[in-house]
Image (spheres, rainbow, N blue to C red):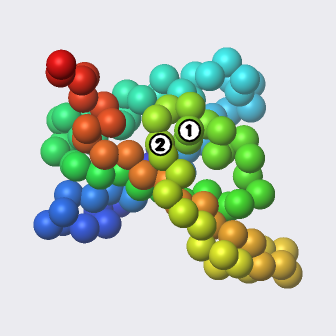
Amino acid sequence: MGFRLENERSRIAHLGGLAVHPDFRGGHISDEAARQFQRHLIFDLGYHRLQLEIYGFNERAMRHAERVGFVREGVRRKAYQRHGEWVDGVLFGLVREDLEPETA
């Protein structure tokens, strides 16, 4: 897993680089790792917003992002050239309030 500072004033981190060895895929270990990473970035390091972008053809990665709480926010149509074709980039975001318990 990795991240970079996207916007210091607005406390935005851009995430990328989640990789799980093939021997450990399918057991949702990446879900728990992603949730812990989100909580660390937001509650320990003080980020307000986490965002990421996934190739539009990567259904597995998009399902993972939604499973761990990211909200699909938009699409960059035909934004990237991959293997001679233009592909979409799907944008996801998660904000601090998404992780905080609701108070009634």
Query: Disc 2 and disc 1: Cα gap in Å?
Result: 5 Å
* Position in image of residue 54 (x %, y %): 61, 57
Q: Position of residue 1 (x, y in %)?
A: 47, 44
Is residue 15 in view from this perspective?
A: no
Residue at left 67%, top 33%? Answer: 21
At label 2, which amino acid type do we have?
A: Phe
Kindly identify the amino acid type of the residue bearing the numbered disc 1.
Glu
Residue 103: percent from left, percent from top: 18, 21
Question: Does residue 7 show up?
Answer: yes
Taking depth in this image into account, of 95 and 27 the one nearest to the observer is 95
Q: Is residue 31 above or below residue 71?
A: above
Residue that numbered label 1 is attached to: 66
Which of the labelled discs sits on residue 70, or is there none? 2
Q: In the image, is residue 46 above or below residue 6?
A: above
Question: Which quarter of the picture shows residue 57?
Answer: bottom right
- Local crowd at mark 1 within 10 Å, few (<14), some, or many (≥20)? some
Find out whether the residues at labels 2 and 1 contact each other: C-beta distance under 8 Å. yes
Q: Is residue 22 above or below residue 59?
A: above
Instruction: Give the quarter of the image for residue 88.
Output: bottom right
- Please rate how many residues cluster around mark 2, counting C-alpha atoms within 10 Å: few if below 14, some from 14 to 19, many from 20: many
